[in-house]
C-alpha cells in the first residue's frame, strides 16, 4: 500500500512539474524563433493598441484581456496538459514506462494539437499546412518532448527503481 501511495504521489508531482515546465518553455521557445517572435510581437502590439483604444471603456478592455488570457490558457492545455495526461494514462494502463513513449507521445500529440482542434470543431478549412503552422508544430513538438521527459524523469523513470 505504501508503494502504491508513493507511486501516486510521484505521478501527481511529476505531472504538475512537467506541465509547468512545458508551460514555462513554450513562451521561451516562441521568443527564440525569429518568425514566431515577430508574429507574437505584432499580436501583442495590436492587442496593446486595442487595449488603449478601449481605455475609456473598461468592460471592453477587460473583455480583451480575458480573451487573451483564455487563448494562453487554451494553448497551455492543448500543448502541455492534454498530451501529457493522455500519454501518462495510456502508459499507465499499457505498462509503458519508457522515455520514448513519454517524450515521443507527448511531442507527437502536442505537435498535432492544432490539427486535432481543427478536426474537433469540424472546421471546413482543410488545407495544406502553412510554413507558420509547421513552425508552430515544431515548437509544440519540442515542448511536448520536454514535458514528457520531465514527467518520465520524475514519475515513470522512478517507477523502475522502486520496483527493483
Image (spheres, grey):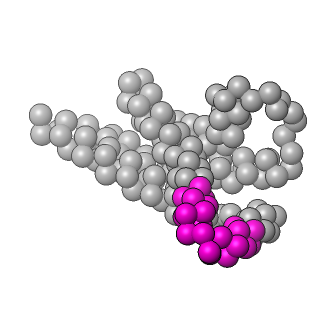
Say which quarter of the image contains residue 51: bottom right
Most foreground residue, 151 or 62: 62
Q: Which residue lies at the image location 37% right of the left edge and 52% below the top edge?
A: 16
Q: Which residue lies at the image location 45% right of the left edge and 52% below the top edge?
A: 19
Q: Which residue lies at the image location 64% right of the left edge and 28% below the top edge?
A: 120
- Residue 53, magenta (yes or no): yes
Residue 75 percent location from the top left of the image: 59, 50
Residue stretch rendered in magenta on the structure: 45-68
The reply to whether residue 99 is visible in this rendering is: no
Q: 5 left or right of 164? A: left
Q: Which residue lies at the image location 24% right of the left edge and 46% below the top edge?
A: 9
Q: 156 left or right of 48? A: left
Quarter of the picture holding the N terminus:
top left
Residue 155 percent location from the top left of the image: 35, 46
Residue 154 percent location from the top left of the image: 36, 51
The reply to whether residue 132 is visible in this rendering is: yes
In this rendering, the count of numbered labels is 0
- Residue 103, magenta (yes or no): no
Residue 73 position (above or below residue 27): above
Q: 133 left or right of 97? A: right
Residue at far left of view: 1
Quarter of the picture holding the C terminus:
top left
Most foreground residue, 109 or 116: 116
Chief secondary structure of the magenta span? Answer: helix
Q: 88 left or right of 139? A: left
Residue 15 percent location from the top left of the image: 38, 48
Amino acid at each position: 500500500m505504501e508503494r502504491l501511495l508513493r507511486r501516486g504521489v510521484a505521478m501527481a508531482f511529476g505531472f504538475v512539474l512537467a506541465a509547468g515546465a512545458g508551460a514555462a518553455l513554450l513562451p521561451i521557445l516562441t521568443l527564440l524563433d525569429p518568425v514566431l517572435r515577430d508574429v507574437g510581437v505584432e499580436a501583442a502590439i495590436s492587442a496593446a493598441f486595442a487595449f488603449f483604444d478601449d481605455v475609456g471603456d473598461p468592460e471592453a478592455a477587460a473583455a480583451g484581456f480575458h480573451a487573451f488570457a483564455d487563448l494562453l490558457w487554451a494553448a497551455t492545455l492543448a500543448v502541455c496538459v492534454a498530451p501529457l495526461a493522455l500519454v501518462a494514462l495510456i502508459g499507465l494502463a499499457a505498462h509503458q514506462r519508457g522515455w520514448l513513449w513519454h517524450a515521443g507521445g507527448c511531442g507527437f500529440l502536442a505537435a498535432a494539437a492544432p490539427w486535432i482542434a481543427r478536426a474537433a470543431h469540424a472546421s471546413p478549412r482543410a488545407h495544406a499546412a502553412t510554413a507558420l503552422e509547421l513552425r508552430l508544430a515544431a515548437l509544440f513538438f519540442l515542448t511536448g518532448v520536454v514535458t514528457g521527459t520531465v514527467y518520465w524523469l520524475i514519475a515513470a523513470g522512478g517507477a523502475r527503481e522502486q520496483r527493483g
